Image: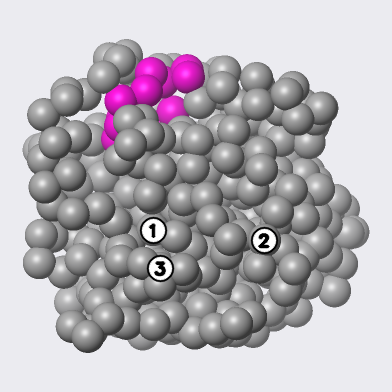
Amino acid sequence: MSRAPARRDAEGRFLNPDGGPSGQPLGQVWRMMREGSGTPWPREVRDPPQPPAAEPPPGHAAVTFVGHSTFLIRIAGGPTLLTDPVWSERCSPFTFLGPRRARAPGLALEALPPLDAVLVSHNHYDHMDVATLRKLRGPRIITGLDNAPILARNSIPGAEELDWWGEAQVGAATVIYIPARHFSARGIRDRGHSLWGGFAIRTPAGSILFAGDTAYGGHLAEVGTELGPFGIGLIPIGAYEPRWFMRAVHMNPEEAVRARADLQVRTAVAMHFGTFKLTQEGIEEPPRALAAAREAAGLDAGDFVVPRFGETLLLPL
């Protein structure tokens, strides 16, 4: 059924849009860990500095890629939004252990303009970084169901929660929380206790999609049908190997190209790559695989853009 709210199982855990459980069984997690970390990443990648972000002209948005799934989105006429802000050195419950940045943030935290809202897709540490959210000093936060208590326990009160298809007004834009095929957890005992999703941002000039973390599935075409077309779509391309495990939670680049079509996105922008080593593929593999998938689909480079870290794209809505 179109625009169905999120469902829970008998134990109160959220289910995926197709009714399936969230994530993979714990035994499969241990199996993947036994396989090893795959292709090594460099300790540090230094990207060339990018020009200062220009103001978007009417009918456009300025989209700045900070890294991973963090984007500064400035829409002509407002609002100014920030997605899944992570400026910490590690995406982990620990400051001394866990995935470490291979690249510095493409924009300094102090360089952020005033924000109208922060969009937090779900509670994984590479998307909900409480250390960064505390440093933002209290902007409006919009997220999924049952994420506000997590933030409140970390001295970040007042987050607004949405169910799938729920709406919040931010200036002239309507922000809609959309389904994703993924899972939530910040420990081993809270899997599925809070909701995961992405965001559609509808403005008088056009719409932007932020897909969040998602595997490929029929929910993407439903979002495209219900809310598309989108002038701009931020779509994940990384953290996908090994496929036997990751296909349940993350798309690979070939699936991301299919998702662009399903979602009715004109200009797709790649995200969720090249920042934190979360899975087995090499650091350069997602952009390479995306280029091959784009060519196989008959798309131009401008149809699915791989942004440079810190780059601001001025794109029509």
Q: Earlier in the sequence, mark 2 or mark 1?
A: 1
| Nearest the eye: 229 or 172 | 229
Q: Which mark is residue 16?
A: 3
Secondary structure state at the residue bearing disc 1: loop
Residue 70 on the magenta span: no
Q: Residues within 10 Å of mark 1 (few under 14, many from 20)?
A: many
Q: Residues within 10 Å of mark 3 (few under 14, many from 20)?
A: many
Residue under pointer 1: 182
Q: What residue is rendered at 33% in x and 30% in y?
A: 242
User: Where in the figure is residue 115, as x and y percent of width and height?
Assistant: 56, 66
Q: Are marks 3 and 1 in contact (CB under 8 Å)?
A: yes
Q: What residue is rendered at 71% in x and 27% in y?
A: 294
Task: Name above or below for residue 109 compared with residue 168.
Answer: above
Q: Earlier in the sequence, mark 3 or mark 2?
A: 3
Q: Are marks 2 and 1 in contact (CB under 8 Å)?
A: no
Mark 1: which amino acid?
A: His
How far apart, in angstroms, are the residues tagged by discs 3 and 1?
A: 7 Å
Residue 283 on the magenta span: yes
